[in-house]
Image: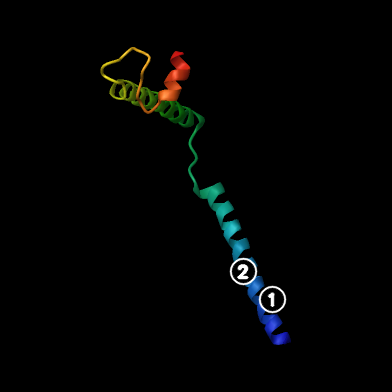
Amino acid sequence: MSLIRERQEKASDRKMDRLTAYIQESIQELLYKVTWPTWDELWNSTILVLVSSIILSLSIFAMDFFVGSDPRVIYGQEFGGVLYWVYNLIFS
């Protein structure tokens, strides 16, 4: 019985050693091998993502508004677009 227990403990120790080595290698890689962006690059990328998101959302809004509208009642009370509830909140 003690032989089985010894093998289980050794296997457990090997797993823990591999996990510890993995964590240490990950830390080393993040500290010394990764090229992090500068604050200016990060700021420019953030602005680009924000502007792109706004343009895309406005495009989707416009397409849904015009294509999702009932052609007989464009500016009336009835509206059949996907964003019916959002339009109802905004324009009510």
Q: Position of residue 87 (x, y in %)?
A: 42, 20
Q: Residue 41 appears in which quarter of the rendering? A: top left
- What's the coloring here? rainbow
Residue identifier under label 2: 15
Q: Quick one: 60 or 47, which is closer to the camera? A: 60
Residue 60 horizontal side relative to residue 11, left or right: left
Q: Position of residue 57 (x, y in %)?
A: 39, 26
* Residue farthest toward the right in the current orientation of the protein: 2
Q: Residue 6 appears in which quarter of the rendering? A: bottom right
Q: Quick one: 13 or 68, which is closer to the camera? A: 68
Q: Position of residue 15 (x, y in %)?
A: 61, 69
Residue 70's label in the rendered image is none
> What residue is at 56 percent from the left and 47 percent from the top?
31
Disc 2 vs disc 1: Cβ atoms closer than 8 Å?
no
Residue identifier under label 1: 9
Does residue 37 sit above or below 52 in this rendering? below
> What residue is at 46 percent from the left and 13 percent from the top?
92
Q: Amino acid at mark 1?
A: Glu
Q: Quick one: 90 or 55, which is closer to the camera? A: 90
